[in-house]
Structure formats: structure tokens, C-alpha cells
């Protein structure tokens, strides 16, 4: 009699009383005994999983909150599901190993269990690598990363993770993956050579997204384009021109060009010459310069830091007053409205001082020649 389980001992005594002690009966009894113990093992692990979920997980969450770091919280959250399934699968594995299986079946159960453990670990890592996972959002917030770059690295990490899992599981089941990996290396080299322009644009997009020389909505200018950025992808940047045309620029081109980001300016420059006629007196010029300078200093849309109004030089057909200042706004339409208002005020000042604008002109002076002498009369006696 085999002790250790009251139910099994009672069944054994019942069989002895009934006289069922043949070899077949003993084998059936052994199977029933093993299956019962295997079922009890599985139920024990199932109950253990419930206790861990109810008691251990909350205790670990409390420890993680006391650490003062958010990363351990995110790590635990990603592995809660895999840990619960690991306990359940462990119970299933040990229950099967207790059954009187042959060597081939035992090896099959072992390989299957080890493969499932790899899948569970990959499940937790995959959850950490998702774009909208708490860890990804935390990294984006702390390191000020763009959502596009987070999505790119997230997809790349998940693809690498799945590839590694497939290779490890294939090795676990006895497949030789060395030739496959070598083939992937040669295929990757051929792909890189064939798609070098695409890869150059992808890396250019990564540079643009990481360095952020511009973002969506910025007005940028280069040697070839002038417009507002609508969207940035890993291959191209979409720019809306001021004629409403859509311009697709490869990222490799933008990464190697000098870009002027007009939207990053805190103020916008205005510089021009006010040309007046030469009949203006010195007093009129001085009053004109002073009044324009005062008008700009009191204008609410002119930046007070730099205002320059000076009678600069004598031109061929005009007296030139240099006007140099900055508008507070950088929006093009608002900037033009400010310039229009200032131009009208300048015209008003010139009208009040009775000073005229000079037009490009040339003056032609004809000198009157003296009358010619009469040589014939001069030679007479």
C-alpha cells in the first residue's frame, strides 16, 4: 500500500476487499493515483497563483511606490500578466511530469514548457516596448522625445524581440538556425545596398526628429523651398508652399541643407531706406528723423530693443534716411499689417513737414555757349 494520500489509500483498500488485485487492475490503480496527484499539483499551483495575485502583487506595488522611481512601477505592471501565467503553466508542467509518460513525451513537455517561458518573458518585454506603454510615455516626457521617434524605436525593438524569440524557440526544438542567420546577414547587406537612398532618408528623418531644427507648423526657408511644415515622416517632410502647393522633400536633402526657421524668431526685422528730395532743408531732415524715431519707440508692435533712424548718406538723386527696427510679431500677415501702419505714419510725418519723396531721376544741365566771332569782317582792312 502506498501512503501519503487518504483518498488513494481508501481506493487501495476497496480494491483489496473486492479482490481486484490483478496486474491490469494494479496498472489502472497506478494511473488513477498519478492522475489524481497530478490534478492536485495543478490545483495547488492554481491556488498559489491566486494568492500571489491577491497578496504578493499588492505588496510589490507598495515597495515600488516607496522607491521614489516610476520605472519599477512600469516594470512590475508589464510583468504582472506573464508572472500569473508562469505560475499556472508551472503547475501544468509539474502535473504532466508526475504522470507516467514515456521519454519522448517527457522531452516534448519539457521543450514546450521552456518555449512557453521564453514567450512569457517576451510578452513582458513587448509590453514595455509598446508606443503607448507607461514606460514609453515616461521616457518621452523625461527626455523630451518626439512621438515619431518613440514609435520608430518601439517598432524596431518589438521587431528585434520577435525575431530573437523565434530564433531561440527554433533552437530549443533542435533546428539549426546558423545557416538562416547567415542568410539574413547576406540578405540584409544586399537590401542595404539596394535601398541606400531610402536608408539615407530614414537616418535623415531620425536626425531631424532628434535635433528638432523644425516641427510641424514652422515656416522654414532653404535654398530650394519656402513654406510651412505640415508633417515629418521617416522618409520625407511635407511642406505647404505659400502658393498652396504641396512639396515633398527627402529627409536626406533637408538634413544636409542650411535651414532657416522663420518661426523660431522672437521678432522680425524691418530695414529700408527712406529717400527724400534734395530740396529738403537740414532742419526738415532733422525733424523727420526725430519724429520717425519717436513714432517707432511708442508703437506697441515695434520691439523697443533696437530702433535705428539715421540720415545715412547722399545718394545720386535722393537724401537717404536709414530705418531699422523689429516687429514684435513673427506671423507674416500680422507683420505686414504692422509695416503698413508704420508706412502710413511715416507718410503723415513727411506731409506735415512738407518733405517730398525722391524719385529715381537724372538732371540734365545744358550750358549756353558764347556767340561765335565773325572772322571774315575781322580780316578786312
Image (cartoon, grey):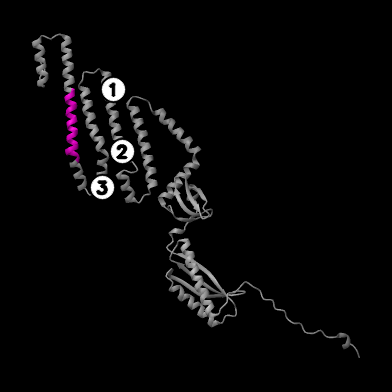
The answer to whether residue 46 is magenta is yes
Q: Determine whether the residue tagged by mark 1 lies in a helix, strand or loop.
A: helix
Residue matched to label 3: 70
In this orientation, which residue lies closer to the viewer: 361 or 59?
Answer: 361
Residues packed near mark 2 inside 10 Å, few (<14), some (14 to 19) or many (20 plus): some
Note whether 110 is above or below 225 in the view shown. above
Residues packed near mark 1 inside 10 Å, few (<14), some (14 to 19) or many (20 plus): few
Residue matched to label 2: 125
- Pointer 2 or 3: first along the chain: 3
Residue contact at pointers 2 and 3, CB within 8 angstroms: no
The image quadrant where one finds the N terminus is top left
Which region shows up in magenta? Answer: 38-57
Note whether 104 is above or below 114 in the view shown. above
Q: Residue at x 26, y 18 (%)?
A: 103
Q: Does the magenta stretch mainly form a helix, a strand or a loop?
A: helix
Labelled disc at residue 108: 1
- Pointer 1 or 3: first along the chain: 3
Structural distance between the alpha carbons of marks 1 and 3:
41 Å
Structural distance between the alpha carbons of marks 2 and 3:
17 Å
Residue contact at pointers 1 and 2, CB within 8 angstroms: no
Q: Residue at x 18, y 10 (%)?
A: 24
Q: Determine whether the residue tagged by mark 2 lies in a helix, strand or loop.
A: helix
Q: Residue at x 81, y 84 (%)?
A: 372
- Looking at this view, name the residue that lies furthest to the bottom: 381
Residue 376, image x, y percentages: 88, 85
Residue 182, image x, y percentages: 42, 31
Amino acid at each position: 500500500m502506498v501512503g501519503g494520500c487518504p483518498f488513494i489509500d481508501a481506493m487501495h483498500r476497496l480494491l483489496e476487499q473486492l479482490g481486484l488485485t490483478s496486474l491490469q487492475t494494479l496498472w489502472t490503480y497506478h494511473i488513477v493515483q498519478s492522475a489524481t496527484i497530478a490534478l492536485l499539483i495543478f490545483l495547488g499551483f492554481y491556488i498559489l497563483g491566486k494568492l500571489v495575485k491577491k497578496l504578493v502583487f499588492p505588496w510589490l506595488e507598495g515597495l515600488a511606490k516607496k522607491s521614489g522611481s516610476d520605472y519599477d512601477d512600469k516594470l512590475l505592471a508589464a510583468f504582472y500578466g506573464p508572472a500569473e501565467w508562469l505560475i499556472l503553466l508551472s503547475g501544468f508542467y509539474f502535473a504532466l511530469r508526475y504522470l507516467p509518460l514515456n521519454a519522448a513525451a517527457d522531452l516534448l513537455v519539457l521543450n514546450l514548457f521552456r518555449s512557453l517561458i521564453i514567450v512569457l518573458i517576451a510578452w513582458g518585454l513587448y509590453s514595455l516596448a509598446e508606443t503607448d506603454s507607461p514606460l514609453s510615455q515616461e521616457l518621452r516626457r523625461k527626455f523630451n522625445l518626439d512621438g515619431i521617434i518613440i514609435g520608430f524605436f518601439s517598432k524596431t525593438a518589438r521587431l528585434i524581440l520577435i525575431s530573437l524569440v523565434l530564433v531561440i524557440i527554433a533552437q530549443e526544438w533542435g533546428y539549426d538556425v546558423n545557416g538562416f542567420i547567415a542568410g539574413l546577414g547576406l540578405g540584409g547587406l544586399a537590401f542595404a545596398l539596394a535601398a541606400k537612398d531610402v536608408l539615407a532618408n530614414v537616418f535623415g528623418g531620425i536626425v531631424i526628429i532628434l535635433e528638432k531644427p523644425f516641427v510641424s507648423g514652422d515656416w522654414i526657408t532653404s535654398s530650394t523651398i519656402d513654406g510651412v511644415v505640415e508633417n515629418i515622416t521617416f522618409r520625407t517632410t511635407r511642406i505647404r508652399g505659400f502658393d498652396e502647393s504641396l512639396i515633398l522633400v527627402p529627409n536626406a536633402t533637408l538634413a544636409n541643407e542650411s535651414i532657416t526657421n522663420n518661426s523660431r524668431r522672437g521678432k522680425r526685422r524691418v530695414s529700408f531706406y527712406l529717400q527724400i528730395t534734395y530740396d529738403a532743408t537740414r532742419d526738415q531732415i532733422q525733424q523727420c528723423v526725430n519724429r520717425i524715431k519717436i513714432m517707432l519707440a511708442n508703437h506697441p508692435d515695434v520691439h523697443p530693443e533696437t530702433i535705428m533712424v539715421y540720415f545715412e548718406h547722399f545718394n545720386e538723386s535722393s537724401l537717404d534716411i536709414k530705418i531699422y527696427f523689429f516687429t514684435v510679431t513673427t506671423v507674416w500677415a500680422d507683420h505686414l499689417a504692422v509695416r503698413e501702419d508704420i508706412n502710413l505714419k511715416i507718410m503723415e510725418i513727411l506731409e506735415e513737414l512738407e518733405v517730398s519723396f525722391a524719385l529715381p531721376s537724372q538732371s540734365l544741365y545744358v550750358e549756353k555757349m558764347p556767340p561765335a566771332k565773325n572772322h571774315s569782317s575781322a580780316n578786312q582792312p
